[in-house]
Image (cartoon, rainbow, N blue to C red):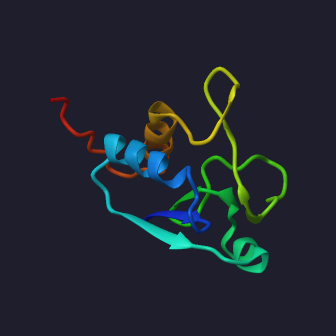
Amino acid sequence: MRLEVLHVDECPNLPPLLARLAEVTDLPVVTRQVETDAEAAALGMAGSPTLLINGTDPFAGPEACQCGVSCRLYRDEAGRLVPVPTVDQLGAAITAAGLNRTRKADP
């Protein structure tokens, strides 16, 4: 079971995504910097950052991947454009993938 985040160099949305993942799970997260559109297409990166759970993008739409090294936007539960999925969306994606989700204890 693998959580991997694909991103471009200096992506401002990488730190918030990693922070939200840390709120949701104690599973290790691997990050991979992607430098070319060809590499993005080969990996299935639909913009930066892209979370892959066991190699699959849980936030991919039904259309073909618009893969590339551009920034990515997501839709939150209210349909608003946001730079990263919400904590609840990430938790649901991890649970749907059948991964053990260990939420960190509240202080």
Outermost residue on the left side: it is: 107
Whole-percent x, y for residue 76 in the image: 62, 29
Whole-percent x, y for residue 107 in the image: 15, 29
- On screen, residue 34 versus residue 107, left or right, reads right
Whole-percent x, y for residue 17 in the image: 48, 48
Outermost residue on the top side: it is: 78
User: Is 21 drawn above or below residue 55 in the view shown?
Assistant: above
Q: How many marks?
A: 0
The residue under the point 69% across, 67% down is 44
- On screen, residue 11 versus residue 74, left or right, reads left
User: Is 31 drawn above or below residue 24 in the view shown?
Assistant: below
The residue under the point 31% across, 57% down is 27
Whole-percent x, y for residue 6 in the image: 57, 65
Instruction: Name the residue nearer the viewer: 60 or 7.
Output: 7
The residue under the point 69% across, 50% down is 72
Quarter of the rendering occupied by the N terminus: bottom left
The residue under the point 63% across, 74% down is 34
Quadrant of residue 83 within the rendered picture: top right
